[in-house]
Image (tube, helix red, strand yellow):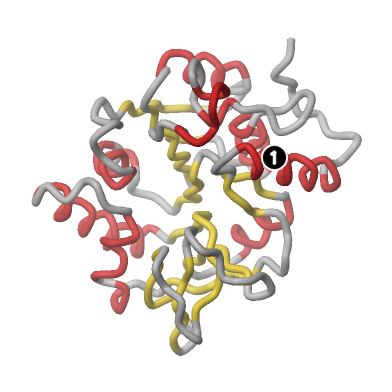
Amino acid sequence: MKALLLNSGIGSRMGSLTEKNPKCMCQIGEDYTIIGWQLELLRKNNIRDIVVTTGPFAELLENHALSYGNGLNIVFMNNPLYRETNYIYSMYLARDFLKDDILLFHGDLVIEPSVVADMLSAKCSVVAVDSQVPLPEKDFKARIENGRVAEIGVNLFCRNCVACQPAYKLNRSDLALWMDEIEAFCQRGETRVYAENAFNSISSKIALYPLELGNRLCNEIDDLNDLKTISERFARILNPGSTIRGANR
């Protein structure tokens, strides 16, 4: 099992917080950054091989991630075209490292431990969904048909659609199919779309199932309001005895 953390975005909606840092280095508590928490979750679940894609401030992000990386084997893959491409291209660049079962998280995602545990215990490929919250206006939704995920996108508002978060556990065979389609998209020059566009074009071949969150914390931080709300939720679920290393040293 490996992990893929996607961190090639600009984070333009975070104001001054991303003028000199990538978004994943934003603090979600007095002592914790988003990527620091993600790396600690992976370590606690014995996932040691991690691919981190980078975009702006790549060297700064590498040093920051490595400061949490005791016992982890982290490979960094820079997307030099981060301003002109979406993360589909970052995944394409990292394709040679993605040959195993993986956990895939967007780099601005804050996740509580029980969600990761449930993902790892699933025998099938899964993506996080939450049927208990309203459909978001701009964020991902998943269309469910016959118990499987048939489509993922931002413009889905159908009866059998649910809120979806970019947190995946993918078996290697399903990942291989998706990566082949991602490669086809990128070789055609379709690099400004979501990687989920490639999934949608072959979803009938990929056995991806919804993993119900039940209103547990698994949310992206897109703007400053999200940062405030999610940081407050994070503080409530954080184990007081946690040994997570702080970002403020």
Seen in the picture, residue 50 relative to 194 is either above or below; the reply is above
| Quadrant position of residue 12 | top left
Q: Residue furthest bottom?
A: 146
Quadrant in which the C terminus is drawn: top right
| Quadrant position of residue 79 | top left
Q: Which residue lies furthest to the left in this view?
A: 188
Q: Mark 1 points at which residue?
A: 44
> In percent of the image, x 24 and y 30: which residue is there?
81
Looking at the picture, how far across and down is residue 118, in whole percent?
66, 62
Q: How crowded is mark 1: few (under 14 residues within 10 Å), some or many (20 or more)?
A: few
> In percent of the image, x 81 and y 29: which residue is there?
243
Seen in the picture, residue 128 relative to 188 is either above or below; the reply is below
Which of these two is toward me, 85 or 105?
85
Looking at the picture, how far across and down is residue 190, in whole percent?
16, 51
The kind of residue on which mark 1 rests is: Lys
Seen in the picture, residue 98 relative to 125 is either above or below; the reply is above
Looking at the picture, how far across and down is residue 187, in whole percent?
10, 48
Q: Which residue lies furthest to the right in this view?
A: 240
